[in-house]
Image (spheres, grey):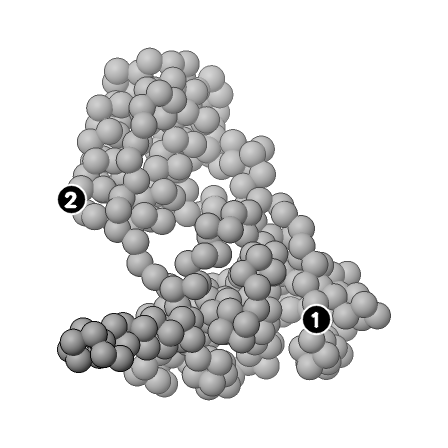
C-alpha cells in the first residue's frame, strides 16, 4: 500500500501523521492493539488483495467500493467463512481503527457471513506419524510431533520456551491466541524427547532456537519442511500444520475424551469451536451408519427387525 491522496467520499477523520505510509500506520495500530504476527500478516495480505482487485491503494477507496468488494467476496468468489471473516476484520481494522472512518459498513450495518463451510482434513495417527517421520530435521520433526501429540498450533509449538516446561509437575504452560494462557499435561515420552533435543543446543530461552540462537524456529522454514515431506507421499496433498492439531482433537474424542476437556486442551474460547470435531470421529460415523442400516432393514422387511 502506498501513501496517496485523500479517499473519496470519506465520512470521518483522516490520518494525521503524514510521515507514515498507510501501511506503516496500520502496522503501528496493530502493534498497539497487540495483534499477533500471524494475524498482522493475514490482515496485510487481505489489504493487498483489495488493492489488487481495484488497482489502487486502499486509502483511496470509498465506502461504496468496499461494500461492493465485500459482496463480491461472498456472492461471486464464494470464499469460505473463515477466509471471509479474516478479510472483513482486516478491512474494518484498516478503515475504522487505523483511518478512523465511521462507515456504516463497520459500525451499523449487519453483514451476513457466507454459508460455505468446510470440515478440516484429519489424519489417522499412523498416517500422521508416517508423514512426520519423513521430515529430515530432528527439531522440525519434534515440533510437528508436539502439534500431533498435544494439539498445538504451529505458532505455539515453534515458540516454546524452556521456562514453559515444569519437569516436576510434567506440565507445559502455553500462551495462545488472544494472549490466553493454558496448562497442558506433558506426556513422559514427549518430555524426554524435548529434553534430549534441548541437550543438543542448550539454548537458555528456546526449545526450538534458530541457527543464531536469537529466536525460535522460522515458521516459513517449518512449513517448507512439511511441504518437502508431503512431496514424498501423494496421499498427503492438502495437509497443513494445522492438520496435526485437527488429528489430535479427533483422536481424543474417538478415544472417549470429554469434549469440554478437549476445549480446554485446545484453548478454544467457545465450545462451538470444538464441537466441529464430533463430525469427524469414526465411532460416531459407525454408530450413525449402524442406525441407518437398522432403519432400512426394518423398512424393507415390513417392520420386522
Q: Could you say where residue 93 lies in the image, as x and y percent from the top left?
A: 43, 32
Residue 77 lies left or right of residue 273; in this view the side is left
Residue depicted at 39% across the width and 37% down the height = 90
Residue most extreme to the right? 168
Check disc 2 and report the residue beneath it: 76
User: Which quadrant does the N terminus fall into?
Assistant: top left
Residue depicted at 54% across the width and 72% down the height = 256
Vertical side of 196 occupied by 218: above or below: above
Q: Could you say where residue 67 lies in the image, as x and y percent from the top left?
A: 24, 29
Residue depicted at 22% across the width and 24% down the height = 64
Whole-angstrom CA distance, mark 2 to mark 1, is: 46 Å
Sequence-wise first label, 2 or 1 = 2
As rendered, which of 57 and 181 lies closer to the eye? 181
Q: Could you say where residue 94 lies in the image, as x and y percent from the top left?
A: 40, 31
Q: Secondary structure at mark 1?
A: loop
Residue 281 lies left or right of residue 211; in this view the side is left
Q: Secondary structure at mark 2?
A: helix
As rendered, which of 47 and 268 lies closer to the eye? 268
Mark 2 or mark 1: which is in front? 1
Please say whether residue 41 is visible from this viewpoint.
yes
Please say whether residue 147 is visible from this viewpoint.
no
As rendered, which of 228 and 267 lies closer to the eye? 267
Q: Quadrant of residue 235?
A: bottom left
As rendered, which of 104 and 184 lies closer to the eye? 184
Vertical side of 265 occupied by 16: above or below: above
* Category of crowding for the residue at label 2, using alpha-carbon neighbours closer than 10 angstroms: few (below 14), some (14–19), many (at least 20): few
- Give the numbered dot on residue 186: 1
Residue 2 lies left or right of residue 24; in this view the side is left
Amino acid at each position: 500500500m502506498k501513501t496517496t491522496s485523500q479517499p473519496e467520499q470519506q465520512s470521518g477523520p483522516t490520518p494525521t501523521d503524514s510521515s507514515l505510509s498507510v501501511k506503516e500506520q496500520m502496522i503501528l495500530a496493530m502493534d498497539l492493539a497487540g495483534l499477533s504476527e500471524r494475524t498482522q500478516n493475514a490482515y496485510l495480505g487481505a489489504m493487498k488483495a483489495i488493492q489488487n482487485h481495484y488497482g489502487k491503494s486502499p486509502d483511496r477507496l470509498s465506502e461504496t467500493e468496499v461494500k461492493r468488494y465485500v459482496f463480491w467476496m461472498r456472492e461471486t468468489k464464494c470464499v469460505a467463512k473463515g477466509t471471509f471473516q479474516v478479510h472483513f476484520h482486516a478491512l474494518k481494522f484498516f478503515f475504522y481503527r487505523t483511518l478512523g472512518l465511521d462507515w456504516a459498513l463497520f459500525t451499523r450495518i449487519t453483514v451476513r457471513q457466507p454459508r460455505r463451510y468446510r470440515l478440516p482434513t484429519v489424519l489417522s495417527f499412523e498416517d500422521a506419524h508416517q508423514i512426520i517421520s519423513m521430515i529430515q530435521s530432528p527439531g522440525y520433526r519434534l515440533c510437528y510431533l508436539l502439534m500431533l501429540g498435544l494439539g498445538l498450533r504451529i505458532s505455539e509449538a515453534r515458540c516454546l520456551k524452556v521456562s514453559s516446561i515444569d519437569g516436576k509437575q510434567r506440565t507445559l504452560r502455553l500462551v495462545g491466541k488472544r494472549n490466553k494462557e493454558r496448562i497442558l499435561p506433558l506426556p513422559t515420552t514427549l518430555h524426554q524427547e524435548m529434553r534430549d533435543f534441548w541437550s543438543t543446543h542448550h539454548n537458555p530461552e528456546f526449545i526450538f532456537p534458530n541457527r543464531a540462537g536469537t529466536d525460535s524456529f522460522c515458521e516459513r522454514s517449518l512449513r517448507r519442511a512439511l511441504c518437502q515431506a508431503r512431496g514424498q507421499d501423494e496421499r498427503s496433498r492438502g495437509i497443513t500444520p494445522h492438520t496435526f492439531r485437527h488429528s489430535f482433537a479427533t483422536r481424543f474424542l474417538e478415544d472417549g475424551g470429554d469434549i469440554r476437556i478437549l476445549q480446554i486442551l485446545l484453548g478454544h474460547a467457545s465450545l462451538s469451536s470444538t464441537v466441529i470435531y464430533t463430525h469427524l470421529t469414526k465411532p460416531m460415523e459407525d454408530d450413525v451408519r449402524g442406525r441407518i442400516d437398522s432403519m432400512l432393514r426394518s423398512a424393507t422387511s415390513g417392520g420386522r427387525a
